[in-house]
Image (cartoon, coloured by chain):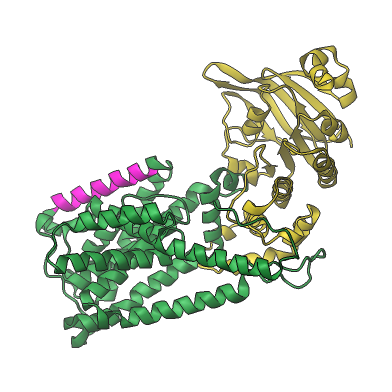
Chain colours: A yellow, B green
């Protein structure tokens, strides 16, 4: 991966204050095109708030967000998604009554006008079949395609989350703790999966698992109390004194 | 649920979803429903039969919002009642065949629903219900105050029933029923089309997880407004036929108790099923009619008690419970048929 590409995602002095608490505090983040960029930091460091800011779920108190030099500050989540920034959720967030296939169909339809066609049959969604099968195959869910997701195992739901993000064919993928709550085996499988889908894409992810961060990230930004504490390649960052005391130290000795 | 064969390669035979049994069951239900609708005025006093079908469409229209989008509108009397008035006024002043008047009423309801929906969908949950209730009350007071037009407390009297000079339809309720039935059935078909369209799929996703739907790029508020307006339009069709059926529009049609009644019917039957609304309307209207004709004056007491009992005993409503039992039985059958095939977790109750 290169570090010379265009800037895919940039925040300038991005700040979010919740009732006087600076959850995210003048963050200047730069994610280069084609990079896999990890956001790490202890609980409450502002990672999820930053994600919510980047995807429009929370609007900033001040500062700006640009996606490929286009200002998206203060836009709604659906507008941000339409600009090619897709996200997954830390807590599995699916449509309990729908099947995996129906999920992916919805995701593929999301950026078109097809969803407004209330006078057409839902068979119209079959036109996505080939692409749906391809995406489900990528995350290994083809055999479970017709099951309501309420019946899927945890790891399978996480895999579906990734398929949904991929379905949007995003320019920037934001993955909020893709391995949260997984056992070692699933973690390794997910690392493989993310590595595969990250090829040629810009990815920003949050994860507490340093093994995941070390295996995937080209670049790491360490957050603490809403501020950027350090930034660099994984090996640089993990040897940074401040980072060791703030976070990595704890994690490695744990 | 027919589990498809595991197909690791895309592009092979399309997995048959619920196809076979499910869709056959659907056709059987449809046939039974149609026969019931056609036979109804032979067994029930025709004006009451008409009320049942009109109420059924009303409940179905509400279910698009309540059952499929997850929005509890507590102001649908505004669309039902205003369409009844507009239908009545068109029929009175222009002497057009009643279907034309009904369509006019429905269009008015949709027009009214546009601003109401636009402002209401900004809130969700109980706040959405309260905002729609407030709008419903506003419309009620307009209907009450503007008595030159609406007849105020006296209601709109003497609404004519014109039908291309066909006297049987114009004078006899029995024949009127068959003339008006297609309008209501068309409305029901429309509701079915809506919930089984790409649009309907989005509505369900909004109901299940609004934030997720937004993250997929769906402009949730637009979808909600469209659903609201469509629901109001179907409600309007029902309200218009109701007005022509009675030849009279009472102020009650705009009252919030009417909004409450239709919510009650829909929940009684079972939300998110469409058929539930039909069953709920049938049960509620029949019960009220039976009690009224037997000279009992505590109708609301009885219907209220029935409602409480049903909700306590069958959380999914009458139809919803029957359907759930049926699906669970199907599931048990299929899973025992391929008992050794897989270790399927038992269907979890949501």
- Residue B112 visible in the shown view: no
- Residue at x 74% of width, y 41% of height: A172
Residue A218: name its quadrant. top right
Q: Is residue B81 left or right of residue A225?
A: left
Residue A64: name its quadrant. top right
Q: Quadrant of the N terminus of chain B?
A: bottom right
Q: Is residue B106 highlighted in magenta?
A: no
- Residue at x 21% of width, y 54% of height: B301
Q: Nearer the viewer, residue A164 or A150?
A: A150
Q: Indicate the position of residue B282 as horizontal and vertical percent values.
A: 31, 68
Question: From the viewer's perspective, is residue B33 above or below residue A170?
Answer: below
Q: Indicate the position of residue B69 as horizontal and vertical percent values.
A: 47, 53
Residue B241: name its quadrant. bottom left
Q: Indicate the position of residue B56 as horizontal and vertical percent values.
A: 34, 67
SS assignment for the magenta stretch, majority: helix
> What segment is highlighted magenta in the picture?
B128-146
- Residue B3 visible in the shown view: yes
Q: Nearer the viewer, residue B300 or B329?
A: B329
Q: Count the numbered circles shown.
A: 0
Q: Is residue A159 left or right of residue B309?
A: right
Q: Indicate the position of residue B166 as horizontal and vertical percent values.
A: 21, 87
Q: Is residue B36 left or right of residue A198?
A: left
- Residue at x 23% of width, y 57% of height: B302
- Residue at x 32% of width, y 77% of height: B181
Question: From the viewer's perspective, is residue A248 above or below residue A81?
Answer: above
Question: From the viewer's perspective, is residue A92 above or below residue B300?
Answer: above
Q: Is residue B142 highlighted in magenta?
A: yes
């Amino acid at each position: 991966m290169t570090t010379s590409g265009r800037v895919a995602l940039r925040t300038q002095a991005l700040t979010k204050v919740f009732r006087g608490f600076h959850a995210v505090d003048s963050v200047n983040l730069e994610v280069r095109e084609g990079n896999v960029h990890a956001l790490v930091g202890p609980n409450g460091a502002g990672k999820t708030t930053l994600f919510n800011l980047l995807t429009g779920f929370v609007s900033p108190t001040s500062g700006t967000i640009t996606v490929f030099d286009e200002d998206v500050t203060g836009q709604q989540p659906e507008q941000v998604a339409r600009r090619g920034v897709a996200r997954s959720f830390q807590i599995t967030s699916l449509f309990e009554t729908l099947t995996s296939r129906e999920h992916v169909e919805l995701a593929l339809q999301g950026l078109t006008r097809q969803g407004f066609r209330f006078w057409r049959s839902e068979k119209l969604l079959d036109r996505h079949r080939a692409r749906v099968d391809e995406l489900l195959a990528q995350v290994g869910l083809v055999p479970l395609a017709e099951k309501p997701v309420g019946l899927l195992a945890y790891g399978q739901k996480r895999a579906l989350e990734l398929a949904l993000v991929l379905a949007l064919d995003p320019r920037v993928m934001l993955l909020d703790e893709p391995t949260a709550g997984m056992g070692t085996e699933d973690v390794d499988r997910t690392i493989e999966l993310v590595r595969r889908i990250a090829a040629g894409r810009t990815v920003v992810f949050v994860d507490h698992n340093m093994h995941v961060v070390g295996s995937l990230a080209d670049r790491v930004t360490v957050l603490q109390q809403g501020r950027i504490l350090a930034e660099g390649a994984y090996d640089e960052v993990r040897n940074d004194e401040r980072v060791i005391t703030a976070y990595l130290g704890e994690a490695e000795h744990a | 649920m027919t589990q498809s064969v595991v197909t690791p390669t895309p592009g092979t035979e399309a997995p048959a979803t619920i196809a076979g049994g499910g869709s056959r069951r659907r056709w059987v239900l449809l046939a039974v429903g149609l026969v019931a609708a056609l036979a109804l005025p032979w067994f029930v006093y025709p004006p009451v039969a008409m009320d049942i079908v009109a109420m059924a469409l009303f409940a179905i229209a509400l279910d698009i919002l309540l059952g499929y989008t997850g929005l509890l509108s507590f102001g649908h009397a505004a669309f039902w009642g205003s369409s009844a008035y507009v239908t009545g006024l068109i029929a009175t002043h222009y002497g057009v065949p009643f279907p034309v008047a009904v369509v006019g009423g429905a269009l008015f309801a949709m027009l009214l629903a546009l601003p109401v929906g636009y402002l209401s969908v900004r809130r969700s949950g109980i706040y959405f219900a309260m905002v729609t209730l407030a709008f419903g009350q506003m419309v009620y007071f307009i209907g009450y105050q503007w008595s030159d037009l609406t007849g105020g407390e006296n209601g709109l009297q003497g609404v004519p029933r014109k039908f291309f000079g066909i006297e049987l339809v114009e004078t006899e309720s029995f024949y009127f029923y068959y003339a008006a039935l297609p309008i209501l059935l068309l409305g029901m078909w429309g509701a079915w089309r809506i919930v089984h369209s790409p649009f309907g799929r989005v509505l369900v996703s909004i109901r299940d997880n609004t934030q997720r739907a937004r993250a997929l790029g769906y402009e949730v508020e637009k979808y909600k407004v469209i659903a609201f307006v469509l629901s109001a339009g179907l409600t309007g069709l029902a309200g218009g036929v109701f007005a022509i059926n009675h030849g009279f529009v009472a102020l009650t049609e705009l009252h919030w108790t009417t909004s409450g009644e239709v919510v009650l019917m829909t929940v009684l039957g079972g939300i998110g099923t469409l058929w539930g609304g039909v069953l709920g309307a049938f049960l509620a209207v029949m019960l009220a009619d039976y009690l009224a004709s037997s000279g009992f004056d505590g109708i609301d007491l009885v219907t209220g008690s029935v409602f409480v009992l049903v909700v306590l005993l069958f959380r999914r409503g009458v139809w919803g419970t029957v359907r759930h039992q049926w699906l669970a039985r199907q599931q048990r059958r299929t899973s025992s048929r391929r008992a050794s095939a897989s270790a399927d977790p038992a269907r979890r109750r949501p």
